[in-house]
Amino acid sequence: MSTIHILHHGQCFDGAASAAIVTAFLEQHLGLELGRGIGGDRVRYRAKDHRPGDPYDDDDFAADLVASVDFRYSQDPRLSWFFDHHRSAFQLPGDREHFLADTSGQKFHDSSEISCAGYIARLAHARFGCDLSEHSDLITWADQIDSAAFPTPELPVTLNTPAMRVMAFVESNRDPELVQRLITDLLSVPLARLAEARYVREALTPILERHRADVALIGRRIRIEGIVASFTLLDQPPRAVNKFIPYFHHPTVPYVIAATRGPGWRIKITAGYNPWLPKAAREHNMADLLEPYGGGGHPFVAGCSFAADEEERALTTVRELTDALNTGRPQLPCPTLATCAGHP
Ligand SMILES: [Mn+2]
């Protein structure tokens, strides 16, 4: 029996959705029976993490058919299908040239696509005449989650909807067998039922508890000065903090400055513009703002990092960034402080 490896961006909702969608595409296009009926034995999903150099292992390609989705390019001749939308897809010398020289018609990249799962479905239809509309709910959520186009901050912060719960599960799960099970389920189990599956609920219980504690903690720590909300978690163990939490507490504050701890207790300073305010109303460039501190990023979100023991420097930086954003502007309180204060 031939084997299929689907390599996908790990701990990412779009990565898992892309793995499911490419399976559905290959089933239709090649006339195979993959995910269902064979118990997933024939298809192995392999979650990939970014790392310096080549992120792939040799045995990633030890299969009869290998597809990589929502992740970096590989020049390995055993890669038969490739779909990605990351600007960072081509990092190793020769990657881009190798991709451009490909004549298989099975390798695709478009950095204007908002999700890879949506990209695969749209290409499958346009190029190969495959109809994946049976998975439209999954595709719509992948588009929304990967482009962070949430209608309100409540959605990604309260994690009350099935898709957001499945997202939280995917982002925290490192168990390869549960990766395999979840992606197989994405093909046949509606998100509403999947979010209630025992293995998803059991894994989520402690995660949601920690997340809710962080939501409350950040709510208490936030200081509003003029057009800036800032908070520091330097006394807290390193962890990824949901970047939407400040906007959940203060929906109309334009800018957020945060000091948190990352891997190795390094201090991370981030500056962001409220994604729910009009893009054109942004008056400061976050990347320019962070550049003097050795940081960088995009106009809307940027960051810099300091050594674990540079707490004084971090606090001074938060102070300076807050002042810089407020400079030349009246020191008005957050315009919706009344609303914010009444927020749960
Ligand atoms: Mn993606």
Image (cartoon, rainbow, N blue to C red):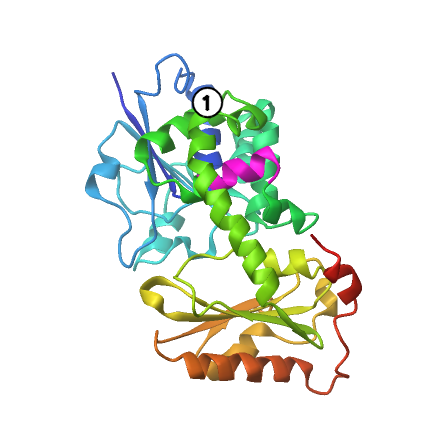
**Ligand 1 has an atom within 8 Å of the beta carbon of the residue at disc 1:** no
State the SS at label 1.
helix
- Magenta segment: 160-169
Residue 165 drawn in magenta: yes
53 lies left or right of 103: left
The image position of residue 87, as x and y in percent, is 47, 56
In front of the other: 227 or 342: 342
Q: Is residue 126 visible?
A: no
The image position of residue 99, as x and y in percent, is 37, 48
89 lies left or right of 252: left
**Three-letter amino acid code at the position of disc 1:** His
Query: Please, is residue 70 above or below residue 334 in the view?
Result: above
Which residue sits at x=74%, y=69%?
281
Give the quarter of the image for residue 288.
Answer: bottom right
The image position of residue 36, as x and y in percent, is 42, 16
Main SS type for the magenta part? helix
Q: Is residue 174 visible?
A: yes
Q: Quadrant of the N terminus?
A: top left
In front of the other: 292 or 114: 292
Residue occupied by mark 1: 29
Q: Residues within 10 Å of mark 1 (few under 14, many from 20)?
A: some
Which residue sits at x=66%, y=59%?
249
Which residue sits at x=54%, y=37%?
165
**Which residue is the extreme one toward the bottom?**
328
Residue 203 drawn in magenta: no
Which residue sits at x=47%, y=52%?
86
